[in-house]
């Protein structure tokens, strides 16, 4: 219960940009979850992924990569014990790591893999597809493929027509404007 409270409070700090404070709480939550539930618990894995995100946001690439590798080791050793969500979250975080590291080809490959894992969970349209298309469009921009970037951004905008208030819609429009 304490670990969950710390974890939830870290999200409040994260929402106001206090990555250092959020990181401290997530580290405490991870220690508690590991001690009480072991390394192979979903709560511990989620906490490590959040920690990897926080250190990545603070541009500590090596430490973030070590955390992601640790999560991959845990998920691989317990392949049947973790949900498709855990694998999707890991691959999406790895894609973010590659993107921030400047490896846009690998970032794109990882985003495509995460998108496939995401779509496999749904029988109809997958709700986060526009976000993935936005991220894939950004990879295409960084790789210099403006045509592919525009295709991805346009497809994401089409899918977002149901929610015109989405902040993602504004971010995509900003990227498209920059391409012109």
Image (spheres, rainbow, N blue to C red):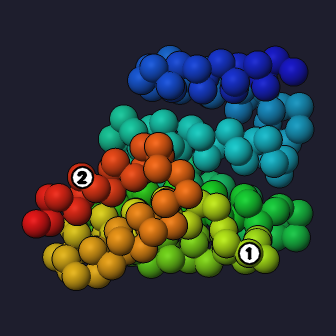
Q: Position of residue 152 (x, y in %)?
A: 37, 74
Instruction: Report the label total.
Output: 2
Horizontal side of 81 relative to 108 (left or right) equals right
- In the image shown, does 15 or 24 lie closer to the viewer? 15
- Above-or-below relation of 125 to 40: below
Q: Position of residue 155 (x, y in %)?
A: 42, 73
Q: Residue at the location (50% across, 25% down)?
A: 15
Q: Residue at the location (28% across, 74% down)?
A: 149
Q: Which residue is mark 1?
A: 124
Label of residue 110 in the image: none
* Quadrant of residue 50 within the rendered picture: top right
Q: Position of residue 75 (x, y in %)?
A: 74, 63
| The N terminus lies in quadrant | top right
Asked if the residues shown at circle 1 and circle 2 are in contact, with their CB atoms under 8 angstroms apart, the answer is: no
Q: Which residue is mark 2?
A: 174
- Above-or-below relation of 78 to 63: below
- In the image shown, does 88 or 55 lie closer to the viewer? 88
Horizontal side of 5 relative to 159 (left or right) equals right
């Amino acid at each position: 219960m304490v670990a969950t409270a710390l974890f939830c409070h870290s999200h409040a700090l994260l929402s106001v940009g206090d990555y250092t404070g959020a990181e401290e709480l997530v580290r405490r939550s991870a220690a508690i979850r590991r001690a009480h539930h072991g390394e192979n618990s979903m709560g511990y894995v989620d906490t490590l992924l959040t920690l990897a995100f926080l250190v990545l946001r603070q541009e500590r690439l090596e430490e973030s990569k070590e955390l992601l590798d640790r999560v991959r080791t845990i998920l691989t050793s317990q392949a049947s014990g973790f949900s498709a969500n855990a694998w999707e979250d890991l691959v999406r975080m790895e894609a973010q790591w590659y993107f921030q590291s400047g490896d846009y080809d690998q970032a794109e490959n990882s985003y495509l893999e995460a998108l496939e894992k995401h779509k496999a969970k749904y029988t109809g349209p997958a709700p986060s597809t526009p976000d993935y298309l936005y991220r894939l469009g950004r990879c295409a921009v960084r790789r210099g493929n403006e045509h592919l970037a525009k295709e991805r951004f346009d497809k994401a905008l089409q899918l977002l027509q149901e929610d015109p208030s989405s902040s993602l819609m504004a971010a995509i429009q900003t990227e498209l404007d920059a391409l012109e």
